[in-house]
Amino acid sequence: MTYDDMGFPVSVSGPARRVVSLVPSLTEAIAHTRREALVGATDWCTHPAGLDVARVRGTKNPDRAAIAALRPDLVIANKEENRELDVRMLRAAGIPVWVTVIQTVPQALDSLTRLFTEALCWPLPDWLVEARRLWSHPLPPVRARVAIPVWRDPWMVVGSATFTGDLARRLGLANVFADHPERYPKVALADIDRDDVDLVVLPDEPYAFTPQDGPEAFRCAPTVLVSGRLLTWYGPSLLHAKEGLAALVQ
């Protein structure tokens, strides 16, 4: 018996051979490590490319009957991305579910370590060891004040206590909404597009900002389009996030 990030007891009987992931970041982590063990994932699980597994609908509306039919040794979920109802119903059906809680880069590294060693009973993957080396450094000086929208109509931004905000800070970017009481607050465009914001960072997910959809809304603050996977995902993407986002602080 071990305990997930929520402190819920999860019965583990040995190395997991059949895994269903309801979290895109963790789907990539599992597939990158032991692809043959991944038997199910959501429609939003886009990495690695060409992943050929059963699809179980979305993160917020998974097909619980389809998950049960896959006979997983473990289902992996996340407190932020998945519904408590689905976790509870899967557990009631006798399916072990491991729920992660991730709000910072160090927390992601620790959570992933426990997922692999305690929940899956697999050896620690080399990519995770390297990711910890890359991200285990003191916070750098602030080089820019940024806003990070994640939706428009209405505009929503990264607020407090988020993995994305913490990763940005570890790149030298200070989130101007970091002290907001909400994690993803709705704000007016004027609250983002202002003179004291050095850069508006527009990821391509969850809202798909593009050169034609996003930058045109801003008049004061400069904008930059970035990979949402590098900015918001935890897993093998951490190996490339620092280099891939380096231009943001140049």
Image (cartoon, rainbow, N blue to C red):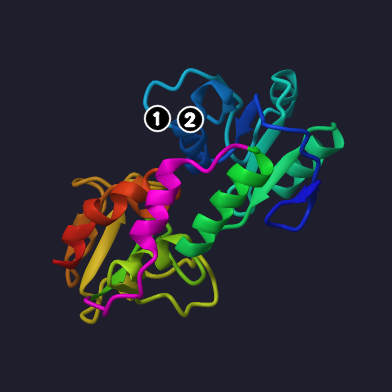
- Asked which secondary structure carries label 1, the reply is loop
Which residue lies under the disc numbered 1?
A: 48
Which residue: 25% across, 76% down? 197
Which residue: 48% across, 77% down? 180
Q: Sequence order check: which comes first, mark 1 or mark 2?
A: 2
Q: Is residue 13 above or below residue 178?
A: above
Label 2: how many residues lie within 10 Å, few (<14), some (14-19) or many (20+)?
A: some
- Label for residue 31? 2
Nearest the viewer among 146 and 76 is: 76
Segment colored magenta? 122-143
200 left or right of 156 in image: left
Can you tell which quarter of the image residue 58 is in?
top right
Answer whether residue 123 is magenta in the image.
Answer: yes
Which residue: 29% across, 48% down? 240
Q: Are marks 1 and 2 in contact (CB under 8 Å)?
A: yes
Nearest the viewer among 153 and 207 is: 207
Q: Amino acid at mark 2?
A: Ala
- Residue 145's x, y, as percent? 27, 76
